[in-house]
């Protein structure tokens, strides 16, 4: 059996190595357009800033290792140009020499990835404008910043400009993963960074009110985000810099521009084979990673995956799923019955010591799908026991089925990155296993004062959600609370910090003795700082015949509530 | 309904607060023998060293809060002396005044905890010998160390000794949680610490080979552990210190002794009610937290719990389970159908920046139960992507059913505490939900280079276990490998570090071309550093007709293998 694997990074490399382990006799040819196989593209932003110092660190497994340990024929700088599905051949081109060859296959695996989007804007090819997809990209950006003068001097000959100047101002176009990671790393290098984001929030997979917390965090660390605008063109300034022109007519001067508006599945090659492309623009595969041609498999960022929670086709460019898909494709090629379960989209991004992470469905995804059988909660627990020093607040949003309690998704944000990671990883595991919020209530995670709480934030989330579903704690949200009677059960001293206009204040400790001040004919929406005391108050009110709801997340949720 | 809750810390306090939320009308009386309710006993060792600076931090919820927010009648310094189950009354005694009263109940909840074991050894009451169970304990230890002179001077009057001296040498009797946490905190205070441990390992719930890693870690941080010996008596030295005499006849001088040999369920009060005590010596309850008397409930460290994995009765003194049990008792008393699922024993201990954590069944527990339908694996993955700086190694042991793949238990150790926490918490969630190793393979945890790897250690564990169960990778262990043919597939340069006598070295890259050097009539056990290359080698060997197994964990597992 001869297997050709197109693409030698996450999905392709995993597939090749797994296939060899399963089948010593298979002839395996892995081709990679770039100069390296199996490199760590997730590390590129950190190499730009020097956090990852050596370029060699990014090369996870060498060509030589694939040859020696796995007896795999690896060809780098080798592009697959076209496929003849009928003849079962692939035309290959050496990108250095232009030489083409034709190779036949029994099974073909496509792992071409998803190149960075690059609209044909005026000036988009100017020196100083970069994408961040490959090791050479990172190298060039690093050199541009480190020895900007040399580069600019060289360029001066070409542009006729007079003066070189140091790299001081960066414009990052795009507020997704790569955009924000680059913003952080460029900030660490001392650059002033502006992020231009076409939409109304950073980090698209997050719900907007959670993304708002990240925006504030970025601002505190000196990164300025411009929303609702996009790059429209670029021109060379006389001083050697670049002027970024936006759709709204604004201009931003920059010494370096990072282009990171997203990726698009690479399907050009797949289309030459006539295989099916899905509705989202990715290669369509079944749960055996097989395309519409049973001899052609596809994995990684180029494919559409079934969303684990919603069951809908989606595009998710993540290394973990790519690796697992590559492994499954190899299993199936080797005659095994492996199935891909779908992608939850579990992700984390570290930013200036903090982190944001999420897994499963977001509220906006459910809204887009017209799914209204869900409820959501906001919690602000300590990342570890409050009595142990350094406990930072976690912002946690959990989304679950109203009808069944099934956990649908979770998002967390906090200054304590590992604490964010722990909770979203645990909930990701729970979602994978079909957990309900009642399971979260009973979960038994690690606890010692440095690491958690006797009631972990994950337990709390389950308890809060369980209280809602059992009818013990009716809930409403800032964006839907309006003309109801607002009761604030905080202490007077807390009102000095922030007050809600129109709210009546009765501190929780006095509530039982002041029930006669409350209306029996109106729904009472109860607020406090985090909604914990509001919960206690709602329990008192309900048992005394009032109609009452907590406002989820209390004052803490209000500051990032979306209207 | 009148409910009396005996014990106002984790389980009792949770029960009281939950019960009030469910029932505004219940009359709730919570009595606590000590001076504080709801204090953080898990923080006590950290208060001794001043990491937790203020004593007030340890008081999680005050008496006043219970009264004002929960309308609960709280009595501290109030001991429940006896129960008349027939009359449904409890006799209470004010420990300060000695005054006794009798209170009737409709429902009674016992949460008396588990006092520190204190065998009646000669001299065990000498000044300078402490237990660590309460806030006053921590305060006294702290004062003893901080102002040892004052104390010793005061004591000099009593003992007639001449000279006071600073606290310099500590002996900790017992190598469990509290013992080791105290050892760390006393070390931070500049004391020389010796731990005397009766058994052959520290941290009883860990398997011995994993505990060995912790012992080495302790030694590196200056804590010396003496095994196989126990305290037999104490005497006052002329210089004001204490001499610890051991069972084996050794003596250790100390300026302070911490007694932490374990805890025993407090059942004295329960016995006055004639309720059933279980085989392990704890109060026996059903999954509604009900004792043999249907009007008496019990929660927390004093009860026996069903082990979630083995289904056996066991004693587990942990705050998380105690809190959930208190909540469930309240639910049931309020007429709800809540059930306790059993205790996994998920635990973590931070030590000198690193951590050890575990969940589910240990191998030694399974052995004790005569359960041999299990397999185990050892892995040594990086805590996060190797290409990102600061990646530290995790030692991970996972135990699973041979017949079904069900995950039974996991233990992790590493210098990166949060990374240990993340994996054991995720696996704890998996065990709670009945996951198999095949689920671990497909799990989708958070990945960014600072936080994990595209194939997380949890995925790796699933893959390694899955490979074994699918027959792709036969496995053996250091303790059972013997006269077989040993093949070492490491590079020659690695052999210089450590070599296994009798092993034949063929580097992995040369294996395919040197197969004729290997015997076809003997089982080949393959070793490398971590067992990853051994796996590759085994795949080559099996497919070429050899009988081969990896040695799980490779050289890394050998250093802590038990014979």
Image (cartoon, coloured by chain):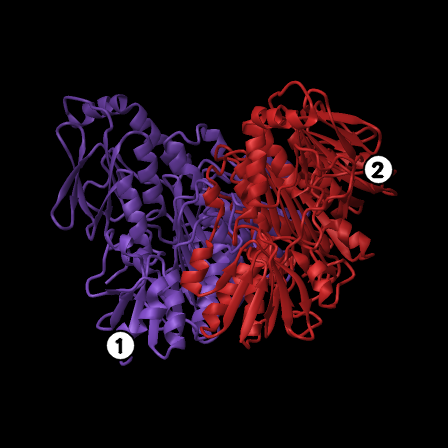
Chain colours: A red, B purple
Compared across the picture, whether A297 is left or right of B536 comes to right
Please report, as a chain letter, where disc 2 is located: A
- The reply to the same-chain question for discs 2 and 1 is no
Q: How many marks?
A: 2
* Image quadrant containing the C terminus of chain B: bottom left
Instruction: Establish if A319 lies above or below B122.
Output: below
What residue is shown with label 1? B519
Camera-nearest residue between B136 and A148? A148
Residue B24 horizontal/vertical position (percent): 68, 47
Residue A224 x/y as whole percent: 69, 28
Q: Nearer the observer, disc 2 or disc 1? A: 1
Task: From this view, report whether residue B210 is shown above or below residue B164.
Answer: below
- Disc 1 is placed on an element classified as loop
In the rendered structure, are the residues bearing label 2 and label 1 in contact, judged by CB atoms less than 8 Å apart? no
- Residue B299 x %, y %: 49, 54
Q: Is residue B552 left or right of residue A20?
A: left
Residue B79 occupies quadrant: top left
Provide residue A341's location: percent of width, then percent of height: 63, 65
Residue matched to label 2 = A485
Residue A391 shown left or right of residue A471 in the figure? left
Residue closer to the observer: B455 or B2: B455
Q: Residues within 10 Å of mark 2 (few under 14, many from 20)?
A: some
- Quadrant position of residue A90: bottom right
């Amino acid at each position: 059996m001869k297997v050709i694997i197109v693409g030698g990074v996450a999905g392709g490399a995993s597939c090749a190595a797994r296939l060899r382990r399963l089948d010593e006799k298979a002839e395996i040819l892995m081709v990679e357009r770039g100069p390296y196989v199996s490199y760590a593209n997730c590390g590129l932003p950190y190499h730009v800033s020097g956090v990852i110092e050596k370029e060699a660190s990014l090369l996870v497994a060498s060509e030589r290792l694939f040859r020696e340990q796995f007896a795999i024929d690896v060809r780098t700088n080798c592009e697959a140009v076209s496929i003849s599905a009928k003849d079962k051949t692939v035309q290959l081109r050496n990108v250095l020499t232009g030489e083409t060859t034709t190779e036949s296959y029994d099974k073909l695996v496509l792992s071409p990835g998803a190149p960075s989007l690059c609209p044909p804007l005026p000036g988009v090819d100017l020196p100083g404008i970069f994408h961040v997809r490959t090791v050479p990209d990172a190298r060039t950006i690093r050199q541009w910043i480190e020895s900007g003068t040399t580069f600019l001097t060289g360029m001066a000959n070409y542009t006729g400009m007079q003066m070189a100047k140091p790299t001081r101002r960066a414009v990052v176009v795009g507020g997704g993963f790569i955009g924000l990671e680059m913003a952080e790393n460029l900030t660490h290098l001392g650059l002033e960074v502006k992020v231009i984001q076409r939409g109304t929030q950073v980090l698209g997979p997050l719900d907007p009110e959670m993304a708002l917390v990240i925006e504030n965090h970025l601002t505190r660390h000196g990164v300025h985000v411009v929303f609702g605008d996009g790059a429209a063109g670029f021109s060379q300034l006389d001083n050697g810099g670049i002027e970024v022109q936006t759709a709204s007519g604004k201009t931003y001067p920059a010494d370096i521009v990072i282009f990171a508006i997203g990726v698009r599945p690479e399907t050009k090659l797949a289309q030459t084979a006539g295989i099916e492309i899905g509705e989202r623009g990715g290669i369509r595969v079944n749960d055996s990673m097989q395309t519409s041609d049973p001899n052609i498999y596809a994995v990684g960022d180029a494919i559409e995956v079934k969303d684990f929670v919603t069951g809908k086709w989606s595009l998710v460019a993540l290394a973990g799923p790519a690796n697992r898909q590559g492994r499954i494709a190899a299993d199936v090629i080797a005659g095994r019955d492996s199935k891909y379960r779908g992608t939850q989209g579990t992700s984390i991004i570290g930013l200036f010591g903090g982190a944001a992470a999420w897994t499963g469905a977001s509220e906006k995804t459910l809204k887009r799908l017209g799914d209204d059988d869900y409820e959501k909660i906001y919690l602000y627990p300590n990342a570890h026991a409050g009595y142990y020093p350094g406990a930072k607040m976690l912002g946690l949003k959990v989304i679950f089925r109203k009808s069944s309690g099934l956990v649908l998704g979770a998002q967390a944000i906090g200054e304590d990155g590992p604490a964010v990671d722990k909770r979203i990883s645990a909930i990701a595991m729970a979602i994978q296993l079909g957990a309900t919020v009642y399971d979260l209530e009973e979960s038994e995670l690690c606890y010692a004062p440095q690491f958690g709480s006797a009631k972990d934030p994950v337990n709390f989330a389950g308890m809060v959600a369980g209280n809602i579903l059992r009818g013990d704690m009716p809930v409403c949200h800032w964006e839907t609370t309006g003309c109801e009677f607002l009761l604030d059960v905080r202490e007077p001293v807390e009102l000095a910090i922030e007050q809600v206009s129109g709210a009546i204040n009765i501190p929780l400790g006095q509530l039982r003795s002041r029930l006669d001040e409350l209306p029996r004919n109106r729904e009472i929406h109860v607020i406090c700082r985090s909604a914990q005391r509001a919960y206690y108050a709602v329990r008192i009110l309900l048992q005394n015949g009032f109609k009452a709801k907590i406002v989820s997340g209390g004052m803490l949720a209000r500051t990032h509530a979306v209207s």
